[in-house]
Amino acid sequence: MWIKEFFSNDILIFSFISNISAQALKVIFDFAQKKKINWHLAISTGGNPSSHTATVTTLTILLGIRYGPNSPYFTISFVVASIIVIDALSLRREVGEHSKTMNEIFWETPWGKKLREVIDIKIFKELIGHTGLEVAAGFIWGLIIAAINIMIIK
């Protein structure tokens, strides 16, 4: 019974679709720019559009439509979505910028080369956070997926 209810939860399913399709769009958009497929983007954080933003946008809109803006479901989702978006724009973005600087120091300077001889240093992941445009694209994509759900489910 629980499994049947889980898989019939259209809000959960469409939020998942929003995430997966946003991840696929990252690969497509990157291919359009570089003419080379980077499958790693399908499972990565960062990039355009923000899949986290798309997911929480779809979730929040559908909860608001289904249960109303005064519902505790919408309230919780809105607060969590706000935290996720702010985190993507600030903290995770800043971590990505720090990673770029650290990689430049360790991999492109004589001092970094000497340090690598003594210490095992890995390449830091640079694509972590998002630009405002990437978050906006994620928001729009989440809105589109929510609209599709609304048209289908009514």
Image: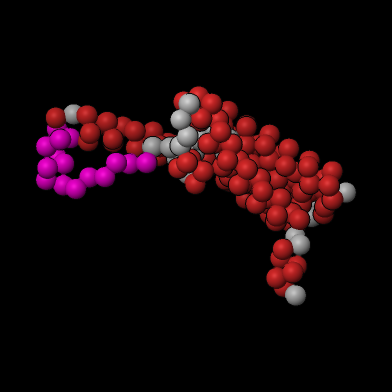
**Residue 54 in view in this figure:** yes
Compared with 120, 134 (above or below) is above
Quadrant of the rendered structure where residue 12 is? Answer: bottom right
Residue 40 position in % (x across, y down) = 45, 42
Report the side of 117 relative to 81 (left or right). left
State the residue lying farthest toward the bottom: 1
Q: In this orientation, which residue lies closer to the viewer: 69 or 39?
A: 39
Q: In this orientation, which residue lies closer to the viewer: 8 or 126?
A: 8
Residue 14 position in % (x across, y down) = 71, 50
Compared with 33, 150 (above or below) is below
Q: What's the residue at 31%, 32% (across, down)? A: 101
* Residue 146 covered by magenta stretch: no
Image quadrant holding the N terminus, namely bottom right
Residue 94 position in % (x across, y down) = 42, 36
From which residue to which does the magenta span run?
A: 111-125
Q: What's the residue at 62%, 37% (across, down)? A: 138
Report the side of 45 relative to 105 (left or right). right
Q: What's the residue at 51%, 30% (across, down)? A: 31
Q: What's the residue at 66%, 48% (across, down)? A: 17
Q: In this orientation, which residue lies closer to the viewer: 11 or 130?
A: 11
